[in-house]
Image (spheres, helix red, strand yellow):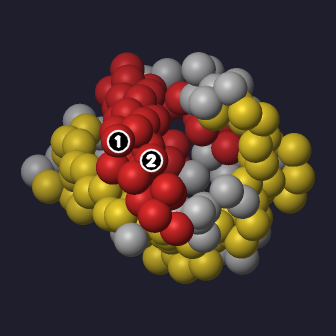
Amino acid sequence: MTTIELQMRIKATRDVCFDLSRSIDVHKLSTHGTNEQAIGGRTRGLIEEGEWVKWKAVHFGIPQTMTVQITEMKEFRYFVDEMIDGPFRWMKHEHHFTAEHGKTIMSDKFEYETPFGILGKVFDRLVLKRYMTNLLIERNKTIKRLAESGEWRKVLDN
């Protein structure tokens, strides 16, 4: 199993960061390089506990789909999405939000297992972990930019 842990300080309230993080529209904005599209389940707006979304994207030149479901949520504090169908053997992403002196500390814990035995493990060490880390960093930078600039109002009001 591989674990990626990231933290980002954002000059915005916890509720804004929480909602931007569960916004399907923000996720699409943050993944312009892979042209991710929501093609099933919740395809717009804010995903809620129990809901799922099916994503279509191109990674490593290969068209792929992945379906994730929000399996846990405590409003403004955390939520968890888990893969229910897709390219990993298993995947779980925890999103945590801590208020601190008018700012938010947004923390990610992204865990997954690759398929294909030893070949998957080698691919993970050489390429995949860095690739997934960069995707998460881009997503978090998008959330930070929207939250700190006030642009979040345009995205969340749609």
Please give left or right for residue 97 compared with residue 19 in the image: left
In the rendered view, would you say 37 is above or below 96? above
**Compared with residue 88, is residue 64 higher up or lower down, i.e. above or below?**
above
Q: Amino acid at mark 2?
A: Phe
Residue located at (62% from left, 45% from top): 23
- x, y percentage for residue 22? 57, 52
Residue 104 percent coordinates (x, y): 24, 49
Query: How far across and down, in percent of the image, does residue 86 sit?
Result: 72, 60
Residue shown at the point (54%, 29%) measured from the top left = 30
- Quadrant position of residue 153: top right
Q: What residue appears at the point 41 percent right and 30 percent down from the top-left corner?
A: 138
Q: Does dot 1 land on a helix, a strand or a loop?
A: helix
* Label 2 packing within 10 angstroms: few (<14), some (14-19), many (20+): few
| Tag shown at residue 123 | 2
| SS type, badge 2 | helix
Cα–Cα gap, marks 2 and 1: 5 Å
Q: Could one spot residue 136 in this view of the protein? A: no
* Residue drawn at (59%, 20%) of the image: 33
For residue 142, say whether it is visible.
yes
Given contact means CB atoms under 8 Å apart, are the residues at marks 2 and 1 in contact? yes
Q: Quadrant of residue 56?
A: top right
- Residue 126 circle label: 1
